[in-house]
Amino acid sequence: MPSLNDIRSTYLDFFKRNGHTVVDSSPLVPRNDPTLMFTNSGMVQFKNCFTGVETRDYKRATTAQKCVRAGGKHNDLDNVGYTARHHTFFEMLGNFSFGDYFKAEAIAFAWELLTRDFDIPKDKLLVTVYHTDDEAAALWKKVAGLGDDRIIRIPTSDNFWQMGPTGPCGPCTEIFFDHGDHIWGGPPGSADEDGDRYIEIWNNVFMQNEQFEDGSMIDLDMQSIDTGMGLERIGALLQGKHDNYDTDLMRSLIEASAHLTSNDPDGPGKVHHRVVADHLRSTSFLIADGVMPSNDGRGYVLRRIMRRAMRHLNMLGTQDVTMYKLVPALVRQMGTAYPELAQAQSLIEETLRLEETRFRTTLDRGLKLLDEELSGLPEGADLPGPAAFKLYDTYGFPLDLTQDALREKGRAVDVAGFDAAMEEQRAKARASWSGTGEAKDAKIWFELAEKHGATEFLGYDGEIAEGQIL
Ligand code: ATP
Ligand code: MG
Ligand code: MG
Ligand code: MG
């Protein structure tokens, strides 16, 4: 059975054999791209190659790209632990053509790799195309011999791929694998397409447009190809599993979590282990790429993911600072393919250890407060905004951590109420601020405070709390 490390190599070797240059993954923090929080797909590092702004000494490239989808246009944070196919951190395998080959070759490469090198049974595969793309539909018929019932035309943005609000984009064709009727879910485009029976494994984008901020879209001079296949998804399939979290790599992390917390990996704490395994990867790779926990921007997303994982570890019964102890298991699995991870190991461990030490001082009390609040509410009622705000402000619970905790109980937060409480506190802080008395200074100070997050979270008991403006 091929490991994820084997599958990554098979993919890169296949495209190398077919004239592609193997290019390293770019960092998770996109360089010079303020429109994007984290690298969310393989094409990010090649964005300017599609628009013709940049040329390289190759026209075909292939990569295994580190991706994080925990914010912005593509955000899978809330799916983690609950679907079989989503991670916040995953690896996207891709092949790219910059004005070189186009639809026909891309479809032929995809079909050959899947059905010959990976030996996937043809009758388990089906594809989607953008509803107006007759050319792609005809190619699938010709190259793969697929019948019309297995070439599904989709009119929505699912088959028109965009990295973010602006940038190169285009119609796409996606390849799905049918895991069988013992799993709930319908084919793409059907009412129950959100189920996990038909899993999208590979997206092939026909890059031919560029979207601008004012809403206009142009045809690009070049016709290019950008593809993305989730390594964990193809891995599950090739290992005879349905669930990404049952692949060798993810399973070893789940087992490490189970071992460390003296729990059964498949027992009642199963969801917690899945979340921990996923968040361990995203936080470690983000730290290795230079993101540090903070109170705004990228650093706050990192803090949110870390604290979420720490709450799940707490739910598994750990009383000690724990998460950093899982880092060696991750480095063992992925440190060879991504040497930056191994190099940053002690930085990652220390960052996780400090963050958890800090968060643990308020976590138990926050969870207790949450339970008290809930017990005083009518059955099924939303947690009121002020309570969620208190958890945020005094106990360092990011809003999504509270939402995540409530989800397990079938409850939600009154988000409008939370926002109102936040705004009220800001207004109060503004009103009581004395400073130099100069209105101009005050304005600058508040702008800075809002931009950078006012303070560091130092804990409970009269110290300065997270997000608090003095
Ligand atoms: P889905 O519809 O399942 O959420 P997507 O359409 O958002 O996937 P794309 O943006 O087309 O995904 O990304 C290309 C490929 O990357 C997908 O076909 C899938 O194999 C993989 N992928 C996307 N999101 C994730 C994720 N959160 N975790 C793991 N793999 C992913
Ligand atoms: Mg998605
Ligand atoms: Mg999709
Ligand atoms: Mg897709």
Image (tube, rainbow, N blue to C red):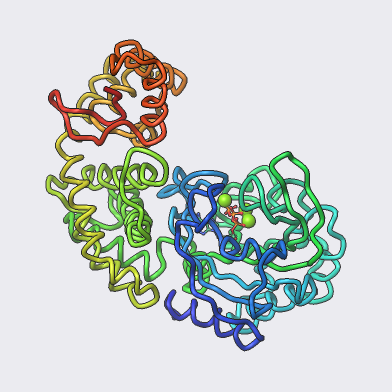
**Residue 380 seen in the current view:** no
Residue 319, image quadrant: top left
Q: Does 239 sit left or right of 96 as displayed?
A: left
In this view, the residue in front, 96 or 184, is 96
Q: How many marks?
A: 0
Residue 134, image quadrant: bottom right
Q: Position of residue 309 (x, y in %)?
A: 30, 47
Give me the residue at 49% from left, 66% from top: 26
In this view, the residue in front, 227 or 266, is 227
Q: Is residue 266 above or below residue 74?
A: below
In this view, the residue in front, 271 or 112, is 112
Q: Position of residue 270 (x, y in %)?
A: 32, 51
Give me the residue at 40% from left, 64% from top: 246
The extreme bottom residue here reads: 17
- Can you say which quadrant of the picture contains the C terminus? top left
Give me the residue at 68% from left, 77% from top: 59
**Residue 75 seen in the current view:** yes
Q: Is residue 94 above or below residue 1?
A: above
In this view, the residue in front, 225 or 46, is 46
Q: Does 454 sit left or right of 315 as displayed?
A: right
Q: Is residue 366 above or below residue 164?
A: above
Q: Position of residue 314 (x, y in %)?
A: 21, 43
Q: Position of residue 194 (x, y in %)?
A: 59, 47
- Can you say which quadrant of the picture contains the N terminus? bottom left
